[in-house]
Amino acid sequence: MVRAGDVEAEILAAADHSDVLVLGAHGLNPTRDLLLGTTAERMLRKSRRPMIVVRKEPRAAYQRVFVAVDFSMHSMAALAFAVRIAPSAHLHVFHAFECPYESKLRRADIAEEILRQLQSRCRDQAFANVRNMIEKSEAPVERVSSVVVSGNPRHVTHAAAAEWGADLIVLGKHGHSAIGEFFLGGVTRHTLSRAESDVAVIPHYPRL
């Protein structure tokens, strides 16, 4: 298909009749990218379809798919997409957590033992939520692993994916309001800008 007109607008219009939008990682207009964010980020704000940003030349089907979850409906959609887009891949479900008020408690010089107990409870709850998500998905248990880590998701997600050797990172897309669409979530934007692997960003109800 060849169309004349604004590149981004024409791609998005065509994508409305497709199941998945695939885009190269390099911007179509580097100068504009510096001012308004990358082409991929701008299209992600507007696209209602799952979008895969490709960074490496494909040599085979995806084999190691890293799914970052936060237990939202968007995360469930991301996990379901991963199961369908890579039916023979190993899926690694990842969650990073921060205990509520932990930083304030540390500043208040709360005993370290109490903080460890808080961390343990947060971790146990996160593991339970991850297991529940996996059980609700259609992922074959023998092809799924999971991990829960303490830390800011924005800062640890792409590093964890690289350490695991992911060839695809899958994230849920948050936000349907004008503000939510204009400002990509911190984890999504951080991962898009730093990941070495392909990245898929999935809306709440992907059509696939």
Image: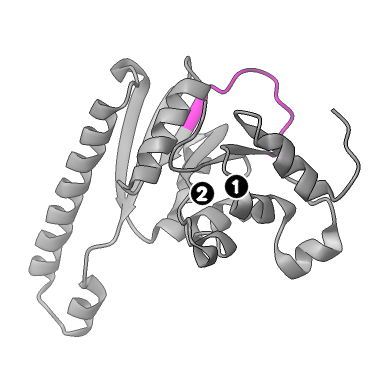
* Residue depicted at 83% across the width and 50% down the height: 28
Q: Is residue 90 magenta?
A: no
Q: Residue furthest right?
A: 4
Instruction: Characterize the local packing of mark 1: few (<14), some (14-19) or many (20 or more) Cα atoms within 10 angstroms.
Output: some
Q: Look at label 2 and name its amino acid.
A: His
Instruction: Characterize the local packing of mark 2: few (<14), some (14-19) or many (20 or more) Cα atoms within 10 angstroms.
Output: many
Q: Secondary structure at mark 2?
A: helix
Quick one: 125 or 35, which is closer to the camera? 35
Q: Where does the image place residue 82, in percent across and percent down from the top left?
A: 46, 29
Q: How is the image coloured?
A: one colour
Q: Which residue is mark 1?
A: 195
Q: Are marks 1 and 2 in contact (CB under 8 Å)?
A: yes
* Residue depicted at 52% across the width and 25% down the height: 208
Look at the image and tell me whether residue 68 can be seen.
Answer: yes
Residue 58 lies left or right of residue 49; in this view the side is right
Instruction: Please state, as top left, top right, bottom left or bottom right, where the N terminus lies in the image.
Output: top right
Q: Secondary structure at mark 1?
A: loop
Look at the image and tell me whether residue 22 can be seen.
Answer: no
Residue range in magenta is 54-65
Q: Is residue 97 above or below residue 36?
A: above
Of helix, strand and loop, which mostly describes the magenta segment?
loop
Residue 158: numbered disc:
2
Residue 123 lies left or right of residue 183; in this view the side is left
Q: Look at label 1 and name its amino acid.
A: Ala
Q: Is residue 76 above or below residue 122?
A: above
